[in-house]
Structures are given as structure tokens and as C-alpha cells.
Image (spheres, helix red, strand yellow):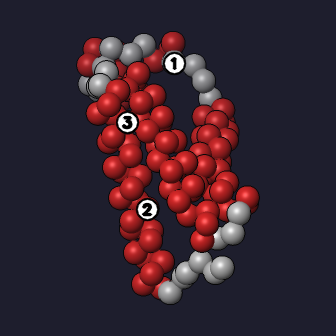
Amino acid sequence: MTSKSGALDSLVREELGIDPEKLGGSAWAAAGWSFVLFGAGALFPVAPFFLSAARSAIVPSVVLSGLALLAIGAGTSLFTGRGVAFSALRQLGVGLAAAAVTYGVGTLVGVTLAG
């Protein structure tokens, strides 16, 4: 434990079962993919607003966002080992909670949809 890099290497190998030399990848690639995927995910709630008036786009936006959240949650079950239904519903719940907080803050500051 006197060598910090040696201690870290040992802990990662023994406790996490990860070989640091096999990880590969780059921080720039991870940042780029994160940007692309975040941007793609942001299209789901706003896409209906490009196609119709503000008020009539609310329901399609909620439905499209909910379906996307369910799909993302189901996809995460491949990495977590949890059930597909649990992961999908959990992701939907987190997304709905975030939407509720955002709506509440918007209401408090007086932001509304025109139209």
C-alpha cells in the first residue's frame, strides 16, 4: 500500500475483477458519445412541438417521452441484471419525477406554453 498506483491496481483487480489494461477507450470518445446520445434522447420530448401547435403537442410529447424512457430502462436491464419490467418502470418513474419537478419550477417562475 505504499505505492498508490500499485495499491489502486491491486484493488481494482481483486475487488472489482477488472483488468485496467483491457479497458481501452478514451475520455474524448466517451464524451463525444455522451453528447450524441444525450442530444438524441432530448429529441423525443421536443419532436411533437416541431410538428404541431404548443398545446396539442403536449400529449404526444408525454407519450413519446414515456416510451423512450421505458425502452432505455429496459435496455439498462442488460447491464444491471435486474428484470426488464423493473428497470423500465424505474426509469419511467425517474423521468416522470424529473418532469414534475421541471413543471413545478416552471410554474413557480411563471413560464407557460403560448398557443
Q: Quadrant of residue 28?
A: top right
Q: Residue at x 60, y 49 (%)?
A: 44
Q: Where residue 75 sits in the image (x, y, percent)?
A: 45, 28
Mark linked to residue 99? 2
Image spot of residue 84 (x, y percent): 35, 27
Residue 17, position as x, y percentages in the image: 33, 14
Q: Nearer the viewer, mark 2 or mark 1?
A: 2
Amino acid type, label 1: Leu
Bin the neighbour count of mark 1 within 10 Å (Cα to Cα): few under 14, some 14-19, many 20 and up: few
**Image quarter of the C terminus:** bottom right
Label 2, label 1: how many angstroms apart (C-alpha)? 35 Å
Considering the image in quadrants, where does the N terminus appear? top left
Dot 1: element: loop
Q: Is residue 10 visible?
A: no
Choose between 95 and 18: the one closer to the eye.
95
The residue singled out by tag 3 in the image is: 88
Q: Which type of secondary structure does the marked residue at label 2 adopt? A: helix
Which label is found at residue 57?
none
| Residue wearing tag 1 | 23
Left or right side of 33 for 73: left
Mark 1 or mark 2, which is nearer the start of the sequence? 1
Total numbered circles: 3
Q: Nearer the viewer, residue 73 or 14?
A: 73
Q: Residue furthest bottom?
A: 110
